[in-house]
Amino acid sequence: MRTWKLLQIRPGLNLLLPLTRSQRTGPGIIILIPHGTPSVKFEKGVPSLSLKWAEEGYTVAEIQASCFEDRSASPLKEAINALDQCAERSSVDKVGIVARLLGFHIHRKLD
């Protein structure tokens, strides 16, 4: 089994490095998830969302919904800065974003 490297930027904001066996890596991707969602876990053989993207060669910045409660912080900027500092990315001018936020109104938090 491959091991992963999960770096905590701050509580609720993590960086997961690519897990690809080849030299292929992708751009960074930001994943917005509900608070308390495990970063790396397998459930019935299926990897978590962040882990799956890391397996595909992406550097994953994971933001839990609770990070948006602090109005003085900017979790998206923090995630982009963390990705910018990561040497494992193949493309520094592109970042993807995926949201898995059941019952969370992210559009109200991103101003």
Image (tube, rainbow, N blue to C red):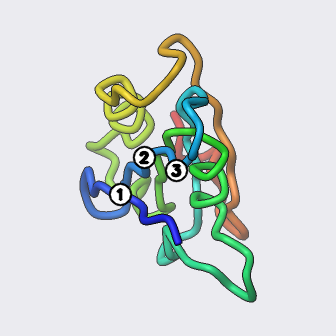
- Residue 10 point in image, percent of width and height: 24, 56
Question: Badge 2 local density, few (<14 within 10 Å), some, or many (20+)?
Answer: many
Query: What is the three-letter code of the residue carrying label 1?
Result: Lys
In the image, 31 versus 89, the foreground residue is 89
Give the vertical position of 56 relative to 77 (above or below): below
Q: Is residue 94 left or right of residue 80?
A: right
Q: Amino acid at mark 3?
A: Leu
Q: Earlier in the sequence, mark 1 or mark 3?
A: 1
Residue 9 in the image: x percent, y percent? 26, 50
63 or 106: nearer the viewer: 63
Q: Which of pointers 1 and 2 lies earlier in the amino acid sequence?
A: 1
Do tag 1 and tag 2 residues touch (Cβ < 8 Å)? yes
> In the structure shown, which secondary structural element does the residue marked by tag 2 occupy?
loop
Viewer-nearest of discs 3 and 2:
3
Q: Could you say whether the residue bearing mark 1 is in a helix, strand or loop?
A: loop
Q: Residue at x 29, y 26 (%)?
A: 85
Picture layout, residue 93 above or below residue 100: above
In the image, residue 95 sits, relative to residue 14, either above or below, namely above
Residue that numbered label 1 is attached to:
5
Q: Nearer the viewer, residue 44 or 68?
A: 44
- Which residue is depicted at the point 68% across and 85% down? 43
The residue wearing badge 2 is 17
Mark 1 Cα shell of 10 Å, populated few (<14), some (14-19), many (≥20): few
Q: CA distance from mark 1 to mark 3?
A: 9 Å
**CA separation, marks 3 and 2?**
7 Å
Say which residue appears at 37% left-offset and 54% top-offset: 14
Report x, y in % for residue 22.
59, 38
- Whether the residues at callouts 3 and 2 have beta carbons within 8 Å, the answer is yes
> Circle 3 is placed at which residue position?
19
Is residue 91 shown left or right of residue 52? Answer: left
What is the spatial separation of the Cα atoms under label 1 and label 2, in whole angstroms? Answer: 6 Å
Amino acid type, residue under disc 2 in the picture: Leu
